[in-house]
C-alpha cells in the first residue's frame, strides 16, 4: 500500500509503451514522471509484444513506488 503522506504519488508516474525502431524491433516500456521529469531514464526493451511490455512496465512501476513509500516522506 502507498503511504498516506504521498496520496498523489501514483498519479505523477506513467508507463509509456512503444515499439523501438522499425516494425521488426521489439517493444519497450519507459517510466515517466509529471510534472517534474525523472533525473534518469527508467526503461527496458526487447519485449515480443505491446502487452508484454505494458505488464513488465506496470510491475516495475509498482516496485519503484513501493520502494519510495518505504523510504518515508522526507526521502
Image (cartoon, rainbow, N blue to C red):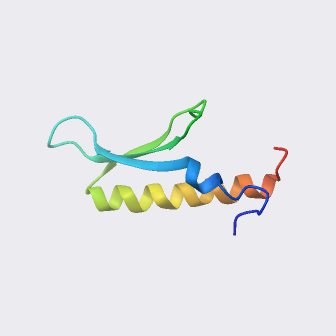
Q: Residue furthest top?
A: 39
Q: Is residue 21 placed above or below 7 in the rendered structure? A: above
Nearest to the observer: residue 46 or residue 6: 6
The quarter of the image holding the N terminus is: bottom right
The structure residue drawn at horizontal position 71% and vertical position 55%, both measured from the top left corner, is 67
In this rendering, position of residue 62 left or right of residue 71: left
Nearest to the observer: residue 55 or residue 3: 3
The structure residue drawn at horizontal position 36% and vertical position 55%, both measured from the top left corner, is 53
The quadrant holding residue 52 is: bottom left
Nearest to the observer: residue 13 or residue 31: 13
- Could you tell me residue 69's position as x and y percent? 74, 57
The quarter of the image holding the C terminus is: top right
Q: Residue furthest bottom?
A: 1
Q: Is residue 45 placed above or below 65 in the rendered structure? A: above
The structure residue drawn at horizontal position 57% and vertical position 32%, both measured from the top left corner, is 40
- Could you tell me residue 28's position as x and y percent? 35, 46
The number of numbered discs placed on residues in the rendered structure image is 0
The quadrant holding residue 25 is: top left
- Could you tell me residue 5's position as x and y percent? 79, 57
The structure residue drawn at horizontal position 70% and vertical position 59%, both measured from the top left corner, is 7
- Could you tell me residue 56's position as x and y percent? 43, 59
Amino acid at each position: 500500500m502507498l503511504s498516506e503522506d504521498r496520496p498523489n504519488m501514483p498519479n505523477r508516474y506513467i508507463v509509456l509503451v512503444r515499439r523501438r525502431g522499425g516494425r521488426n524491433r521489439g517493444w519497450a516500456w519507459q517510466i515517466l514522471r509529471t510534472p517534474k521529469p525523472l533525473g534518469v531514464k527508467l526503461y527496458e526493451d526487447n519485449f515480443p509484444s505491446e502487452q508484454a511490455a505494458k505488464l513488465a512496465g506496470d510491475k516495475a512501476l509498482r516496485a519503484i513506488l513501493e520502494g519510495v513509500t518505504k523510504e518515508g516522506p522526507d526521502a
